[in-house]
Image: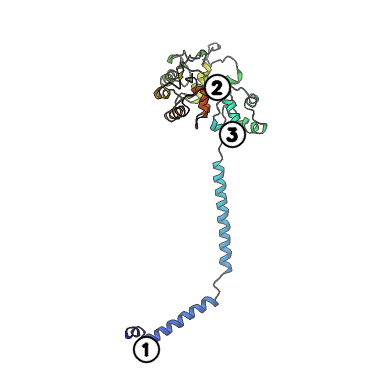
């Protein structure tokens, strides 16, 4: 009990100090409740700054949005990919029609023909067509004439079979050197021969413009006879060796084959999740189910 009382014993000076402290606290509370510290002038300035800041933020958002809008450059509609087609607003069916047409080794020569082949509506065509860029050698459909030096009579150039072209033959194309010529021939060997003209665009590090020049001088005249392999009896290594198949896709094919025991038709490959439909016609140059 004495211990508790000892905590409440104060000297006279301590009691005076506590008393003045209480008075000071009450004084401060009175100032807080009765004195108005707000200022109309400060509020007006603050509101102006907020509006200016909001306008600046809106401006930055507009700039960022403008940068995110993909810019369309002139392009050859013959080489629209799945990704490019979806960017332009084409449906999957329209893209598939274009790819099927191109798989035949044919070229679209005009905006009108593009609409006839793909079936795109007039409004989408009006948006896309200003960016179409058809090479002269495609749109003309005639024998191509090469530029010639002065004092030499201009004459027609007959296209040669790209499957019979040598490195020396390829070097005549502007932009093709020894390395690129060898790379084209190496890829042709890997394919067992070019089956379609557009396969030249698959050569690694060959610019599209240079590839188009190659097709001014060469084309697939005699498609190769490719010995297909049976997907049901082929080994994993044999299927993986096909140029259009990577490890993951080959694995998916074999997993599917194990599930169904035997693939009855090569068309079944389209059922595989993630199978690249745009490559189907090229893959089936090397694979069969019989």
First along the sequence among labels 1 and 2: 1
Q: Is residue 251 visible in the rendered structure shown here? A: yes
First along the sequence among labels 2 and 3: 3
Q: Secondary structure at mark 3?
A: helix
Q: Where is residue 25 shown, x and y percent of the image?
A: 46, 79
Q: Which mark is residue 12?
A: 1
First along the sequence among labels 1 and 3: 1
**Foreground disc of the pair 2, 3:** 2
Q: In whole angstroms, how far apart are the C-alphas of marks 2 and 3?
A: 21 Å
Q: Secondary structure at mark 2?
A: helix
Q: Which residue is mark 3?
A: 88
Say whether marks 1 and 3 touch (CB < 8 Å).
no
Q: Quick one: label 3, few (<14), some, or many (20+) residues within 10 Å? A: some
- Judged left or right of residue 4, residue 254 is right
Q: Which mark is residue 103?
A: 2
**Foreground disc of the pair 1, 2:** 2
Residue in the picture at 52% in, 29% down: 271
Of residues 187 and 147, which is closer to you in this image?
A: 187
Residue in the picture at 51% in, 20% down: 213
Q: In whole angstroms, how far apart are the C-alphas of marks 1 and 2?
A: 107 Å
132 is higher (above) or lower (below) than 32: above
Q: Where is residue 121 shown, x and y percent of the image?
A: 66, 31
Residue in the picture at 50% in, 29% down: 276
- In which quadrant of the rendered view does residue 74 lie? top right
Residue in the picture at 48% in, 78% down: 28
Q: Where is residue 18 shown, x and y percent of the image?
A: 41, 83
Colour setup of the view: rainbow
Of residues 272 and 190, which is closer to you in this image?
A: 272
194 is higher (above) or lower (below) than 92: above
Q: Is residue 171 visible in the rendered structure shown here? A: no
């Amino acid at each position: 009990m004495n211990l508790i009382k000892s905590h409440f014993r104060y000297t006279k000076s301590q009691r005076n100090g506590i008393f003045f402290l209480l008075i000071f606290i009450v004084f401060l509370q009175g100032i807080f409740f009765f004195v108005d510290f707000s200022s109309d002038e400060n509020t007006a300035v603050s509101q102006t700054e907020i509006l200016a800041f909001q306008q600046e933020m809106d401006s930055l958002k507009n700039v960022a949005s403008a940068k995110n809008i993909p810019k369309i450059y002139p392009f050859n509609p013959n080489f629209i990919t799945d990704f490019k087609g979806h960017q332009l607003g084409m449906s999957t069916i329209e893209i598939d029609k274009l790819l099927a047409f191109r798989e035949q080794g044919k070229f679209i020569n005009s905006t009108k023909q593009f609409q006839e082949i793909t079936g795109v509506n007039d409004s989408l065509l009006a948006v896309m067509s200003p960016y179409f860029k058809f090479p002269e050698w495609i749109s003309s459909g005639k024998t191509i004439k090469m530029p010639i030096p002065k004092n030499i009579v201009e004459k027609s150039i007959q296209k040669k079979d790209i499957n019979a072209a040598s490195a020396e033959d390829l070097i005549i194309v502007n932009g093709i050197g020894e390395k690129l010529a060898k790379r084209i021939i190496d890829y042709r060997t890997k394919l067992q021969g070019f089956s379609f003209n557009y396969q030249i665009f698959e050569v690694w590090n060959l610019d599209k413009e240079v590839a188009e020049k190659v097709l001014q001088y060469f084309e697939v005249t005699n498609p190769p006879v490719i010995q297909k392999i049976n997907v049901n009896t082929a080994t994993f290594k044999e299927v993986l060796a096909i140029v259009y198949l990577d490890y993951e896709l080959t694995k998916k094919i074999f997993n599917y084959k194990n599930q169904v025991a035997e693939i009855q038709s090569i068309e079944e490959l389209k059922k595989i999740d993630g199978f690249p439909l745009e490559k189907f016609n090229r893959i089936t140059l090397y694979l069969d189910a019989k």
